Image: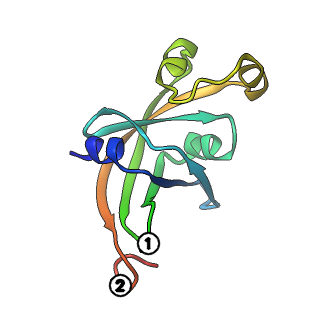
Amino acid sequence: MLSDYFKKTDGLGVLATADSDGNVNIAVYAKPHFIDENTIAFIMADRLSHANLATNPRAAYLFKENGPGYKGKRLYLVKTKEDTDTALIDNLRRKKPSSEVKNATGERFLVYFKIEKTIELTSAGDNRSGL
């Protein structure tokens, strides 16, 4: 199961979004929160990635496992909804922020995505990886 993979695997995640004109943004993101095996969510600040999703609901998430080579996953996503429930967002956070950090970070959004497709991230030499 994909949710088990993310629970057990350490690595680095990158979320790519684009606005309605195709201007791309790439940002480092934590591992996704699994709602079910077809739905994930990310906690987002009111920054460019979040703004892009207001005009273009498609995104891609690349996760590279720690270690040598290029093992990991690529998730192709479509935004389905978002929530601003602070209690829900605080409950999902893996690292609980101090009160000082909470006050400085501004509004947060829980953004839900349907997983449309998952592709393995593979080592160089596999032309499908793009690396």
| Marks 1 and 2, how far apart at CA | 18 Å
Q: Is residue 125 above or below residue 131?
A: below
Which residue occupies the extreme front position in the image? 67
Which residue is more in the foreground, 38 or 2?
A: 2
| Residue 3, position as x, y percentages in the image | 29, 41
**Which of the two discs, 1 and 2, labels the residue nearer the N terminus?**
1
| Residue 47, position as x, y percentages in the image | 69, 41
Query: Please, what is the three-letter code of the amino acid marked with disc 1?
Result: Pro
Q: Left or right? Give the position of 4 relative to 16.
A: left
Say what secondary structure mark 1 lies in: loop
- Crowd band around label 1 with a 10 angstrom C-alpha radius: few (<14), some (14–19), many (20+): few
Question: Residue beneath label 1, please?
Answer: 68
Numbered tag placed on residue 96 in the rendering: none
Q: Residue at x 70, y 21 (%)?
A: 98
The count of marks equals 2
Q: Is residue 91 above or below residue 79?
A: above
Which residue occupies the extreme bottom position in the image? 125
Query: Please, what is the three-letter code of the amino acid marked with disc 2?
Result: Asn
Numbered tag placed on residue 127 in the rendering: 2
Of the two numbered discs 1 and 2 in the rendering, the one whose residue sits closer to the viewer: 1
Q: Residue at x 35, y 45 (%)?
A: 6
